[in-house]
Image (tube, rainbow, N blue to C red):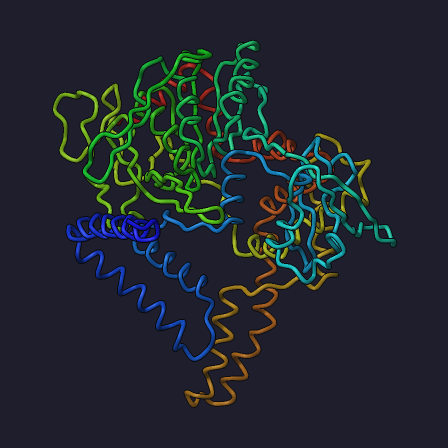
Amino acid sequence: MPEKFAYWVRGGIYVLVIVAIFGFVYADNDDAYTNVKKLDRIAVIIKERYAEHVDFRDLIESGISGMLLSLDPYCRYFTDDDFRDFIDNTYGQFEGIGIEVDIRHRNLTVISVLEGTPAYRSGIAPGDKIIAVNGRLTSEMTREEAARSMRGAAGTPLELTIRRYGINELMNYSLIRETVETKSIPYSSVLEEGIGYIRLTRFTETTYYEMVEALATFKAQNVRGIILDLRSNPGGLLLEAVKVVGLFIEPNKLVVETRNREDNFTRHFSSNDGLSCYDIPLAVLVDEGTASAAEIVAGAIQDWDRGLIIGSRTYGKGLVQRIIRLDDVSALKLTTAKYYVPSGRCIQKPEDAGGLNVTTGLESFPVKNKKPGVYYTASGREVAGGGGITPDVVVESIKDTEIIKALKQQSEFFHFAFRYVNDFREQIGLGFVADGHTLREFKKYLYENDFDYDAQFEMKYDSLVAALPAYGVPGNLRDVIKRLDKQLHDLKFQRLEADAELVKWNLTEEIMVLRFDQQTRYGVVWVNHHPEILKAREILSTDREYREAFVASSE
C-alpha cells in the first residue's frame, strides 16, 4: 500500500471513530445538540447580516452571559481581567503599589494606603489626587481602568503624577510594583471590659493564622468574652471558614456539608484540632451584608449553641460555586451544589436561587416532638430557616438618612475631613470626637461649597408643579404652591440638625482615619458607637447577662 494512501486511510479511520463517538453522545441528547446548532446558526446570521458590524467574540460572550443569567445570580463568565480581580479578592493578595482609589469630585483620589507597601514607603497619602498614570491623564479613564493600570507584575515600574492639598506644584513618584498582601483582620483589640474584639472582613488564605494570632493574644490576657464581627463579610474560602469555626467548637463536629443536584451528599466539613477557645463566651455580629462562608461560620456557631448571633438577618448566599478555566483568557464560575449548616438549614434565600430547590431541609439534631418545617440547634433551641441566618439577638444597624446618603455620595465628609485635618492636625488626638464646633465648621464648609441634594419630598413637589398647567389649575393657586419652594429648600437642610449625632460620628470616623490610620475607625468609632458592638459588650460583660441572652433567644 503506498505510504500516501495509507496515511489517508488512517486519517479516515480516525475521523470515522470521532464521528461515531460524537454520534453516540448526541444520540442520547438530540435536543441539546439541535439547540446548540441553533445557537451557532443564529450567531453566524447576526455576524453576516446585522445592520452594522458585530464583533463575533463579543457576540459569543454575550450569549454565554445570557445563558448563565437564566440559572442563578452567582454563575458568571470571567474574562482574564475579571478573573484576576476575583482571585485577588479571594486569596488576599495582588501585585501593585498598595492604594485604594475612587472618583471624588471628578478627581481620581487616594482613599487609603496599605502599610508597608511601595505607596506607603514613598509617602503617598489619603486625599492625594492622581493626575496621571504613566503619563496618561486619569481624567480620560474610568475608576476601574485607572486601578487596573496601577496594577501589574511585581518588579515593574510605575510613574504617578499627584496633586496634593496646599502644594502648588505637581508631585512625581517613581515606584516599583510588589506583591501586596491584604489582611482579612484589619483590627483586633481587648476592650476596656476585658472583651476581645476581632473585625474579620473576608476569608482568605491567611485568615486562620490571623485568627490564631489574635486569639492567642486574647487568651494571654484572660479575656472574659470575644466579639467576632462578621458584618458585611462577603465570604471567601470555605476551608478557611471551617478552620475558624474549629477554633471555637470541639473537634470532629459538623460545620457544613454540600449537596448536589440530586440532593446527594457531596462533601462533609468538620471542625479540626487547633487553638482551643471552647470555653470563652462568644458573640458573632452579622448583618444583611454577611454572606456565604461568613454565614456558614455564624450558622455553625448558632447550631452548636457555641455563641450568640447578634445583629440582623444575613444575606442568604448558600450556593457552592466552582471555578472552571476555559482557556488562558476566560473562566466559568458555575453553581455545583448547596450549603447546609448542622441544623439542616440551607442558607440560600429562595428568591435568589434561580430554579434550584432550597426549601427542603435535611435531618437536623435529634430533638423530641419536632415541629414540621422547624429547625433546631444541638440543645433544642428553635432556629429559623428560609434563607440566611436569623440572629439570636436582633439589633438594627445604623441606617443612613437621606441627607447622610447624599453627603456620602458627594464625598463631603471625606473632603471636609481632609481640610480639617490639615488645618487642625495638632489639636486632633486619639481621644478626638467631633463636637459642636466641628459641626459648625462642617455646615460652613457645605454652604461655601454650595452643597445641595435632591430630597424625595422636593422631587415630588417639582413633579407637582410641572403637572399643574396640564390639569388647568388656576394661576393664583399655582403661585401659592410655588411659594413653598424656598421653605422646602430650607426644610431639607434642617435634617442636619435632626441628624447631628449621626453627622458627628461620620465626621469623627473620616477625621480619625485621615489623621492616624484605618485602625482608629474601629478602635475609636465602631466600638463606641455601633449598636451591635455595644449590645455585644453589654451581654458579654457578665456571665449572667450571657446566660440570660441564651435563654431569651430560645423563648
The residue lying at 40 percent from left, 40 percent from top is 323
User: Is residue 141 toward the left or the right of residue 464 in the image?
Assistant: right
**Which of the image's four quarters has the C terminus?**
top left
Q: Tell me: residue 508, above or below residue 129.
A: above
Residue situated furthest front in the rendering: 1
Q: Position of residue 273 (x, y in %)?
A: 40, 12
Q: At which x and y percent is residue 269?
A: 32, 23
**Looking at the image, is 309 positioned above or below residue 469?**
above
Residue for point 43% across, 90% down: 472
- Direction from residue 369 to residue 187 in the image, left or right: right
Q: Position of residue 546 (x, y in %)?
A: 40, 19
Q: Residue at x 38, y 35 (%)?
A: 394
Quarter of the figure with residue 436: top right
| Residue 406 as seen in the image, left or right of residue 28 | right
**Residue 67 appears left or right of 476:** left
Question: Where, by quadrant of the figure, is residue 526 drawn?
Answer: top right
Tell which of 298 and 110 is nearer to you: 110
Q: Nearer the viewer, residue 478 or 451?
A: 451
Residue that appears at 69% across and 47% down: 110
Residue 148 in percent (x, y) is at 62, 49
In the image, 546 versus 60, the foreground residue is 60
- What is the total number of numbered labels drawn onto the structure image? 0
